[in-house]
Amino acid sequence: MNIEVSSEKSGDEARIHHVTEQAFLSAPHTDHTEQFIVDALRRAGALTISQVAKADGEIIGHVAISPVTLSDGATGWFGLGPISVLPEFQGLGIGSKLMQSSLDALEEVGASGCVVLGDPAYYGRFGFEVVDGLVFPGVPAEYFQALSFSGEFPQGEVSYHEAFSAQG
Ligand SMILES: CC(C)(COP(=O)(O)OP(=O)(O)OC[C@H]1O[C@@H](n2cnc3c(N)ncnc32)[C@H](O)[C@@H]1OP(=O)(O)O)[C@@H](O)C(=O)NCCC(=O)NCCS
């Protein structure tokens, strides 16, 4: 299987919506709004990084990275997610390719760093770590991690883009 990762192109929107919806269908800890979040981020011009993974030319995975706000006023920080791989293609390394490629692209645009909400075991392998004093209210500390491109971390509370409250 030939997997290629590239930036989202005009015309990919409906397929990305479908892939995101399908990926999260049986995922735990979700209210199944991820596909609406991606759409809303795009509408708001907040999809800083939007990459697709294609298998033999068809989109089977997607990752979104969007700006976050820090209560200490730090700038240049972003949040990774949602990240999605169609269920029948999960566990084949495609998510890892999307993670690596999107983080490389984020570093290239001059970002200070990135945060992620999710399984520490999965995201730790890409360099994310729990940072004392950097929190996302309402989730256990070990599920909120950060990756700095400069080695420095902000402090305080992180807020995601308002598109994350999209319901449809
Ligand atoms: C999370 C997701 C994008 C990973 O993509 P993937 O192509 O399956 O991941 P990879 O094949 O690159 O990595 C597989 C490894 O990660 C682990 N893994 C995959 N998904 C995981 C998850 N949700 N939580 C914890 N570990 C996970 C696998 O056990 C595997 O570990 P191993 O390398 O030690 O065997 C994909 O499983 C998915 O779409 N899940 C549903 C949606 C979701 O939960 N997204 C994350 C929250 S935003």
Image (cartoon, grey):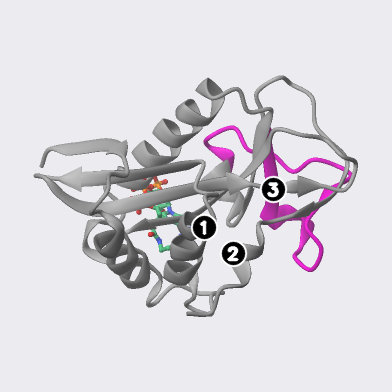
Numbered tag placed on residue 163 in the rendering: 2
Numbered tag placed on residue 5 in the rendering: none
Q: Are marks 1 and 2 in contact (CB under 8 Å)?
A: yes
Residue depicted at x 36% and y 42%:
51
Provide the residue designation for mark 1.
41
Residue 78, image x and y in percent?
A: 64, 42
Residue 18, image x and y in percent?
A: 28, 68
Answer above or below: position of 82 versus 152. below
Residue depicted at x 44% and y 39%:
99
Label 3 to label 2: alpha-carbon separation: 11 Å
Numbered tag placed on residue 68 in the rendering: 3
Local crowd at mark 1 within 10 Å, few (<14), some, or many (≥20)? many
Relative placement, left or right, of 33 versus 116 is left
Name which residue type carries label 2: Ala
Q: Earlier in the sequence, mark 1 or mark 2?
A: 1
Residue depicted at x 9% and y 44%:
56
Asked if the magenta segment contains residue 139, the reply would be yes
Q: Which residues are magenta?
A: 124-147
Q: Earlier in the sequence, mark 1 or mark 3?
A: 1
